[in-house]
Image (tube, coloured by chain):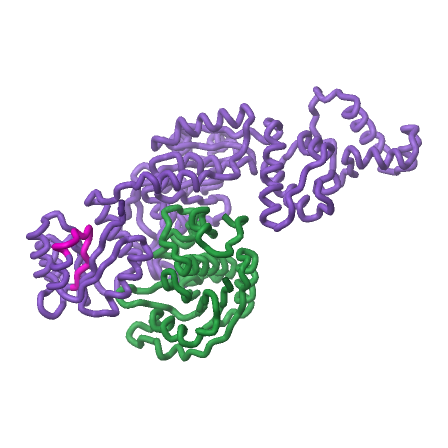
Amino acid sequence: MNTKEKILIVDDEKIVRESLFHWFEEEGYEVDTAEDGENALKKYEKIKFDLLLVDMKMPGMSGLELLSRIKSIDIDSVVILITAFASVPTAISALKNGAYDYVTKPVDPDELAHLVQKALEQKALKIENKQLKENLDEIIKPDNLIGESYQMKKIYELINTVAPGDTTVMIRGESGTGKELVAKAIHINSKRKYFPIIPVNCGALAETLLESELFGHEKGAFTGAQFKRKGKFEMADGGTIFLDEIGSVPLKMQIELLRVIESKQFNRVGGNEVIKSDFRIIVATNEPLEELVKTGKFREDLYYRLNVFSIVIPPLRERRDDIPLLASFFLKKFSLVMNKPAKKISKEAMDFLVHYDWPGNVRELENAMERAMVIGKVDTIIVDDLPFHVSANNFSNDDNRKSLSAMEKKYIFKILNENNWNISRSASVLEIDRVTLYNKINKYGLRKDSH
Amino acid sequence: MDIYIAPLKFSNVLMLGDVVSELSNRFSSKISLIEIQLNLLKYLSKERGQYFSTEIIADAMDLTGKYNGKIILLTDVDLFVPVLTFIFGEAQLSGKHSIVSACRLHEEFYSGKSDDKILFERLIKEILHELGHNYGLLHCLNWDCVMHTSPGIEEVDIKGNSYCKKCASKVDGYKSLYF
């Protein structure tokens, strides 16, 4: 079954017909053209087009006349008139005769795209193709959101619970835990998934830029603004806005933010037009917002407005079971990116990965795997391929690790540090020879603490 | 299938090299720079101060018959097709030629600040997008896909920088690692 929406372009200028034909064809519409009103009517009698784009001024039958004739055949037909010279009487006449809207040549592509989309949606022709939906679902899973641990399963449950509605979500977690991935997972499991999720890193923007970034600006709003630009809130219309590092938003901007979140209305910088936008809001932070509220650095009303449904992502060190899965995933990813054969991870290296504390969380693990893929010489990742140095600070303090090898490793490390990594002296204290000590250092992946 | 890049009044030579390098990473196809001689003034609409892209492509076709592959024309000039105020690029659907303009991809037109990194990201997206049309792709609903429609600069920035799995499967020589 053909589910493409059908558009008929009626214009006496071949060049205009061709331009619009290609433009709509690329949009995925079924497009046909007619050079005058008579031909358009003949085509319309055979095929009921979903939308007609009609030039006002054509030899023979005018655009307005064609509009009347089409409306007499089907009162629900959607016709957009195109005119080279816009005037108030023309506009009134077009709309009185039942035109959906009219545009002036040349038309802004953004305006045309939205106008056509809106017109078709209003006629309830934007029927979601089931197959398309299924394909899309398959495509847009956030592929880095990985984990089978109990903690991650709880996160998935929370995502499934909160995703369908429009509830504001606050995601908390240390840097590198994947807050943006969780936001994306919420978005793609919501009814808003066909619209974009717009991420904004509030911490990366200067106060002066944040306003323009969030609300957009009009042409000429400031030096250098040669074109207008839509802001993030406007872009998120229909979709989701993800405000990362929300704790970094300056106090002055927090007032504006609260107003916009509540009213869903704003002005572009340098503009008077009220822009309305229908967005869902998801925020993330790794700061203790409650402390910021207490010290007056974060508005209490905004805090309560945002902290409706909270998801806390555990640091990687609290879900060590996921480390092998994540490490393998990243290795596979980088083997593809670098066009290198897939590598395995040696037992010692994996042991190290699992027991390392990962202060930089999943992002640090990803970087470690990337580096290992770059410098690894053989088909197995060994401890030497890993980028960090073992130190008392970042090595796990897990008291449960009381195996002989774990104890030996800790002891050797302690002696090495006490002897400033002098191998001969350390070997002497340990009462083993230097070669054995070197072997042990390699086996356990011990490195001199750079700190 | 080989991919040829033909600069037409494209002044940033360093970026041109980066484009070739980036496309070489992404495609198993051979990426080459070619030179074609077209006087762009012929396509200038004095009224609009812009260049008619469809006509540029039409004439470029006559000059590139010997190349067996896709041909991307890369230019700094502002492009238009009648009816629309501007276009970032144009491609022959399931055809051989496309054209991409860097003109409105420059960040300085929007924020007043030049940013070559952003320009490069946008340029790669638009090249992949038009190339996708050459391979018969229509606009994709997936915002993570570079084939998502982008009538404005905001959409160019939001959409993904690679093809989704479904679209990539139709692009000859696109390496699996990028989708």
The residue that appears at 50% across and 36% down in the rendered structure is: A179
Magenta stretch in the rendered image: A44-55
Left or right, residue B90 beside residue A400: left
Q: Colour of chain A?
A: purple
Does residue A356 show up magenta in the picture? Answer: no
Instruction: Say which quarter of the image contains residue A80.
Output: bottom left
Front-most of A214 and A323? A323
Left or right of A341: which side holds A191? left
Colour that chain B carries in the picture: green
Q: Is residue A72 above or below residue B78?
A: above
The percent position of residue A55, horizontal first and vertical second, equals 17, 64
Residue in view at x 37 percent, y 79 percent: B41
Q: Could you say which is closer to the camera, residue A304 or residue A72?
A: A72
User: Residue at image x 45%, y 74%?
Assistant: B64
The relative height of residue B103 versus residue A368 in the rendered view (above or below) is below
The N terminus of chain A appears in which quarter of the rendering?
top left
Q: Position of residue A318 (x, y in %)?
A: 60, 27
Q: Can the viewer see residue A208 in this picture?
A: no
Quadrant hosting residue A168: top left
